[in-house]
């Protein structure tokens, strides 16, 4: 056969191969949504390699060539290739392969301190299996306003603020936030926050006050202290000549909404678990708020809160705010500056969750259901918003009925008083 410059390797996964996978491999494979596969894994350039007619010929190839093939794959494809044959399965256990995959997707993991952290919680393969799929919670649509009404009566203060014994098993300093922001596939910001700011001591105000992490003001131990995060036309932003024009066409806002991607990975070093709390793509936001030059973009996920709060789920809200510092002009490019990157938790009534319960919710989130299907994660967030809106509308209707009853009661009392005493 003639020498080929491009070779396609077609690999099938059988049920027998899949059953032989390790626990981490099975989790990654499930995350990648693959079953029986007949997929073109990759095309490699090679001048002196002959075409392969069957996968049996792969046994004659060297492990170095296999490694060179596998290191070019993304995580999902690498997990699939590991189930294709014994050689790929053996080589895919190399931590260097998964370290390359993780550093490519999350540049923050390239830092020495983060690499040590990941190694201590099980390695890069486990880290990818935990953090590549996004959190999905579909129990929310079953929850209704009538279910919410009886909970506050059943939950006294002791019920609401218990679990102190469980809190003593871990501390806020055990949590690590690994955050990466991409704009049009280019990393524009990578930050790591060790611990949770202002959470010293179990009797402090943190546990009873609304939970919030502001990454830009509290990125302790981050190597990139001095660098401000800015976007300009040279990064791909559309130029705007004035804010008045932007208000009309919304071109800059649409570009930000479609182009920005956020990954916020939370790691608990004590229980050795990790999860990505972000929705990856934007869930919405507000433009020109609170000032004309501000753009607020919202990400997040729906986290289980059963047995922790009266409502079965809460929303993890990740906010990113950009401010226009320059519009297009002579010698000046349109430039945006990142002014806020924060996390907070809200219940179904829109109330902020306090620090104590937030820690419990975040701990539970590290072991909840996830899916590689990002559209499923977005659907989960949209369902939560829909139910939340229905709850607010029903609450307003109930309050309106009560208002009418009180008004009619007042009128009846006045008429009775006038009838008998005047």
Image (spheres, rainbow, N blue to C red):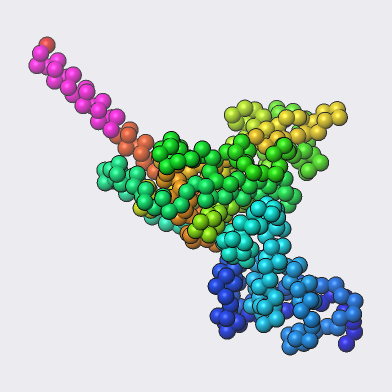
Which residue corresponds to the image point at 73% horizontal and 38% vertical from the top-left?
227
Which residue corresponds to the image point at 68% horizontal and 65% vertical from the top-left?
98
Task: Report which quarter residue 210 is drawn in.
Answer: top left
- Is 254 on the left or on the right of 277, as rendered? right
Task: Report which quarter residue 96 is drawn in.
Answer: bottom right
6 versus 226 height, above or below: below
Q: Can residue 224 be seen in this view?
A: yes
Q: Which of 120 and 251 is in front in this view?
A: 120
217 versus 185 height, above or below: above
Asked if the stretch drawn in magenta spans residue 383, the answer is no
Which image quarter holds the C terminus?
A: top left
Which image quarter holds the N terminus?
A: bottom right
Q: Is residue 132 visible?
A: no
89 versus 213 height, above or below: below
Which residue corresponds to the image point at 53% horizontal and 43% vertical from the top-left?
196
Residue furthest to the front in view is 201
Q: Position of residue 71 (x, y in %)?
A: 75, 68
Q: Give the range drawn in magenta.
A: 402-421
Q: Position of residue 349 (x, y in %)?
A: 41, 41
Residue furthest to the top in view is 422
Q: Position of residue 282 (x, y in %)?
A: 61, 47
- Is 373 on the left or on the right of 112, as rendered? left
Q: Nearer the viewer, residue 157 or 147?
A: 157
Q: Is the magenta stretch mostly helix, strand or loop?
A: helix
Q: Nearer the viewer, residue 355 or 260?
A: 355
Which residue corresponds to the image point at 72% horizontal and 49% vertical from the top-left?
187
- Is 184 on the left or on the right of 394, as rendered? right
């Amino acid at each position: 056969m003639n020498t080929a410059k491009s070779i396609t390797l077609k690999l099938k996964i059988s049920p027998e191969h899949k059953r032989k996978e390790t626990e981490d491999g099975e989790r990654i494979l499930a995350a990648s949504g693959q079953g029986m596969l007949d997929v073109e894994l990759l095309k490699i350039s090679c001048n002196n390699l002959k075409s392969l007619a069957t996968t049996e010929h792969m046994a004659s190839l060297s492990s170095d060539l296999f490694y060179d093939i596998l290191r070019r794959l993304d995580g999902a494809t690498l997990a699939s290739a590991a189930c294709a044959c014994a050689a790929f399965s053996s080589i895919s256990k190399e931590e260097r392969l998964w370290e390359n995959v993780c550093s490519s997707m999350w540049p923050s993991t390239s830092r020495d301190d983060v690499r040590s952290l990941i190694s201590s919680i099980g390695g890069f393969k486990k880290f990818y299996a935990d953090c590549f799929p996004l959190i999905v919670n579909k129990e929310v649509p079953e929850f209704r306003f009538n279910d919410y009404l009886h909970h506050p009566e059943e939950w006294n203060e002791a019920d609401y603020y218990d679990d102190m014994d469980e809190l003593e098993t871990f501390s806020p300093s055990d949590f690590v936030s690994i955050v990466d922001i991409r704009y049009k596939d280019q990393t524009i910001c990578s930050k790591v926050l060790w611990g949770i700011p202002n959470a010293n001591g179990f009797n402090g105000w943190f546990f009873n006050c609304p939970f919030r992490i502001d990454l830009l003001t509290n990125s302790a131990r981050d190597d990139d202290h001095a660098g401000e995060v800015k976007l300009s036309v040279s990064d791909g932003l559309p130029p705007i000549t004035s804010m008045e024009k932007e208000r009309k066409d919304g071109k800059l806002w649409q570009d930000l909404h479609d182009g920005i991607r956020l990954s916020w990975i939370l790691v608990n070093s004590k229980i050795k678990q990790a999860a990505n709390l972000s929705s990856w793509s934007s869930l919405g936001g507000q433009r020109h708020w609170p000032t004309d030059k501000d753009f607020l973009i919202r990400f997040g996920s729906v986290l289980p809160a059963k047995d922790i709060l009266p409502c079965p789920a809460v929303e993890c809200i990740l906010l990113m705010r950009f401010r226009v510092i320059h519009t297009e002009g002579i010698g000046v490019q349109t430039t945006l500056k990142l002014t806020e990157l924060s996390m907070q938790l809200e219940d179904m009534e829109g109330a902020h969750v306090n620090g104590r319960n937030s820690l419990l919710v975040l701990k539970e989130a590290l072991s909840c259901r996830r899916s590689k299907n990002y559209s499923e994660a977005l659907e989960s967030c949209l369902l939560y918003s829909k139910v939340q809106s229905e709850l607010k509308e029903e609450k307003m209707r109930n309050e309106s009925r009560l208002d009418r009853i009180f008004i009619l009661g007042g009128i009846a009392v006045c008429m009775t008083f006038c009838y008998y005493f005047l």
